[in-house]
Image (tube, grey):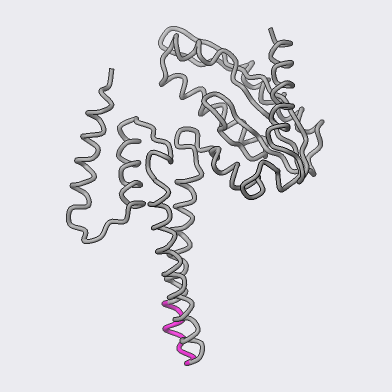
Amino acid sequence: MTDIYQEHVAITSQVKQIIENEKIVFPAKYGKIYHDIARNRDIELNAEELFTAEMLDEKMVRHVITLAACSDKALDAMEKEDKEALKLVIAETKALRDEIRELQKIVYEDTLTRSYNRKWFEDTYLEGGNLSLRESGTLVLVDINDFKTVNDTYGHVIGDKVLIHIAIKLKESGGRNVRYGGDEFLVIFDAAVSSDTIHQKMQNILDYFHHISFKVNNHSFKSSFAYGMASFTGTSNIEAVIEEADKAMYRHKKAMH
């Protein structure tokens, strides 16, 4: 079994070697380097393990300062009709935009499945600090059947492959796919997508998994999931919506056995 502590000691040593010649290393950059090395060593980290609130605040403060400086330079260049200076400002702003997008990806993406994570869902759909949803649509709660048995029988590496494969197919449904828990996903559809259409999309994915098998050495197994749906509006309480979807999911799971 891998000694996680020793793995992190080794990763830290590698990071130090990479950044030793840099005068300034912001925490977010340190975290990204650490994350990339860990992933190459098959160690998955959550965003919370890479960033603290203080690190993110520092990163965003630096972006605000940079953006303010770009704005000042842009205004000055326009007043002086300095096209070359304006080109430089545009280049700086684009680089800043790309860096912010990369930061959002790190913070809002589940590192294993490349789905959105729970923080993205809460920041995107919840209204301020309360539990009210800010949009209308349909929430689908997906729970993988017998996932613990897969992990116990074939190991977590194979379990991870199942999660990744299911996440890929859920993304293909056209909804916004969120890894909500260990073996639970949320798929969010806009209000314009009908319940019948969503049911058909989910059933198509289930049919796909019914016809394929996961192979491990000389063994093979199938994987499936149960799902439940709940519609919501901009005034809905998220806990009530998830509870409704959860009950529907368990009815589906019971009907499958």
With respect to residue 70, does 214 lie above or below?
above
Is residue 192 shown left or right of residue 169? right
Q: Position of residue 164 (x, y in %)?
A: 51, 29
> Would you identify the image quadrant in which residue 200 lies?
top right
Work out which residue is located at the far bottom of the displayed protein and give it. Answer: 80
With respect to residue 213, does 60 lie above or below?
below
Q: Residue at x 34, y 31 (%)?
A: 43
Quadrant placement of the N terminus: top left
Q: Residue at x 60, y 42 (%)?
A: 122
Number of marks drawn? 0
Instruction: Give the camera-side residue of 95 and 63.
Output: 63
What secondary structure characterizes most of the magenta part? helix
> Would you identify the image quadrant in which residue 25 lies?
bottom left
Q: Position of residue 8 (x, y in %)?
A: 26, 33
Q: Residue at x 50, y 14 (%)?
A: 148
Q: Residue at x 30, y 39 (%)?
A: 37
Is residue 27 shown left or right of residue 222? left
Query: Which stretch did the figure color magenta?
Result: 80-88
Quadrant placement of the C terminus: top right
Does the magenta-highlighted stretch encompass residue 60?
no
Does the magenta-highlighted stretch encompass residue 87?
yes
Instruction: Give the camera-side residue of 111 and 119.
Output: 119
Q: Position of residue 52 (x, y in %)?
A: 39, 46
Q: Position of residue 78 (x, y in %)?
A: 51, 87
Instruction: Give the camera-side residue of 68 and 115.
Output: 68
